[in-house]
Each structure stands twice: as C-alpha cells, then as structure tokens.
Amino acid sequence: MKSLRSRLAALCLLAAGMAGAQSSFMGFQIPPNYLSRFASTELVISTEAGYGVRAFPLLMSQDIRVSVVKAPTYWDYNVSTRVNDTTLAAGVFYNVPRLEVTHDPSKGLQYGGLLQGGGNLTKFSAGYAHLLWENRARLLGNVGVAFVGGDGVPYAQTEASAGYGRSFGKLNTYVGSTARLFAFPVQQEAQGSVDAVVVLNTTPLPGLTLDATHFERFVTGEVAVPAFGLGRYNETNAGVTYRLPGDSALGGGAFGVGAVRTRLSHVWQSDVTTLRGDLLLRLSVLPSLVGPSVGYQWTPDGQGRWLVSLVTLPK
C-alpha cells in the first residue's frame, strides 16, 4: 500500500523565510530557482511511512537533494542529484547501501550502473530509447549484466509504453499502458508483463472534483534475477475533493480551510481497503494547501488500523 507523505509544508515556510526578500542567506547566494525545488520535497510525517524529509534541496547552484527518514522498518539517509539527464545517488536507501549512476533521457542513449551492498542487486546496462506517435509512445531496449550472489547474469530488457488523454465535456480521461520483457539467454528464462491504467476526473460543480483510477498488471514467465521479477497486481482508487473559495479563509485570506477531501482505495490481491479523510488548510506563505489526514485500513485478518499523516494539495 502506498504511503502518504506531504510535499512542501513547513519546508516551504522555511524557504520562504530565507529567500522571500533577499538573494543571499548567511553568506550563501540563493539560486533563482531555489524555492521551486521544494515542489518535489517530501516532509514525511506518517504512521505508515515514518518521519523525516526526502529530497531536501541544498543551498547550491547545482540541485543536490538530501534525504533522512526513519520508518518503522528501515532507515533512509542519502544524497542525490540529476545532471544532463543523469541521476547520481549515494547513501542508504531502505536499509541498503547504494551507489548509482543512471543516464536515462526520454530518447537517445541509455546507460547505468548500480552497486548495492548486503547481497542486493548490482547491475550494469546500456541501450537506446525512441519516441514515437508524436512523443506519446516510447520504445526502450537495454542489454546488461546483473550480479546475484556474486554470479553475473546477462539479460536483455525491452519496454514499450504509450498513453493517450481526451476530454468529453467536463469529463477528462487518460489511458496508458506499458509492456515489458526481461530475457535471460543463459538460463533460458523470460518474464513478460503488461501494465494498464485508466484515469477519470470531472468537475461537475465549481470547486468540486471527482476522480477515479484503476491499475492492472498481468505477468507471465520466470526471471533469473529476483529483483527484476513482478507479480500480478490491481488497485482501484476514487476520491472526492471540494475546494472552498479563497475569500472564505479567515484573516482576509491569509489563513483558513482550503479544501476537504475523501479518498478510498482497494488493493484486490491482498484485499486491503483504505479510507482517508483530509482537512487541507490555506496559508498565504505556502504555495500548497497542507493539513492532517486521518484514515482507517481494513485487512482480511480483521486487524484494522488507524492511519495518521500530513498531506498537501496544490493551490
């Protein structure tokens, strides 16, 4: 089940205080796009995901991110950046030491290397990607070698993805699909999988948004590298969001209730249902609505649990 994490929240408040009316802070020059980097920062405050921060931007011209999270079953502490379509990352991810270099533009030459400790997957690969159908479709081919328990396993990866969206009056729709094949010539094994997603949303009344998504994954075959293996999966999500008019906030719009939201999800394989209710507040110093979320999760064993977290929503 996907965990809930907030974006921006108190981090944006801190950044606004540092850069709101000045171009330097404690002798450091603040990059012009520094505040916009917080759009991908995650403040983790959740009974599911733990506590900490992901992708906090350092005060440097190069966009370097730091993550420190203590979750119920793992630690994260790492640093990462992206330069010219290349991701560089080092540190501990989900309790696993990792060093990664991945060059993966939307089209063109692809290559990468991943080193992990603790007997986890290590791999090296290279390939090429094409964009088709007015950039709505992507075809990727990679060859590489993966190391499992010290033994090298050659493999080939082929992946094709496409998506198309269309509006029918107030109803917006999107359909996307990804087909992938991992082949292992030495072991004479292969695994194919197909993902499909359908997204619907509509705004029947001012401020009121209804949305729904359904995801399906079908898998066949076997893999010689367990880390590449996928399993059957499907999940349905639905939500209702009502945004209050901006002038309804207290204090002349500086603070108040910005939106209320209800979300329902069901994972069919595990038969887990989750219902959440969110109260999102509007603060003039923050670029997003932020507030508490309280939910409940039903499981087949009857051991339900309460879920508490901090969530955000774009203004």
Image (cartoon, rainbow, N blue to C red):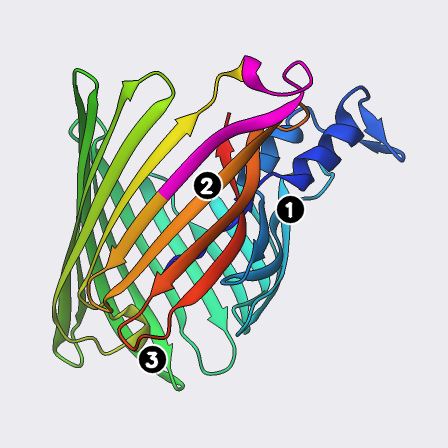
Residue picked out by circle 3: 152
Question: Which of disc 1 and disc 3 is earlier in sequence?
Answer: 1
Which element type, helix, strand or loop, lies under badge 2? loop
Q: Position of residue 218 (x, y in %)?
A: 12, 61
Residue picked out by circle 2: 85
User: Local crowd at mark 3 within 10 Å, few (<14), some, or many (≥20)?
Assistant: some
Q: Is residue 125 above or below residue 186?
A: above
Say if the magenta span includes residue 252. Answer: yes
- The residue at 23%/79% (across/down) is 224
Q: Residue 97 shows which numbered tag?
A: none
Q: Nearer the viewer, mark 2 or mark 3?
A: 2
Which element type, helix, strand or loop, lies under badge 1? strand
- The residue at 28%/69% (across/down) is 228
Q: Position of residue 261 (x, y in %)?
A: 41, 37
Say if the magenta span includes residue 10. Answer: no
Question: Which of disc 1 and disc 2 is earlier in sequence?
Answer: 1
User: Disc 2 residue type?
Assistant: Asp
Report the magenta residues as a range: 247-262
Residue picked out by circle 1: 56
User: Disc 1 residue type?
Assistant: Phe
Q: CA distance from mark 3 to mark 1?
A: 36 Å
Q: Is residue 140 above or below residue 256?
A: below
Q: Is residue 158 left or right of residue 114?
A: left
Q: CA distance from mark 2 to mark 3?
A: 27 Å
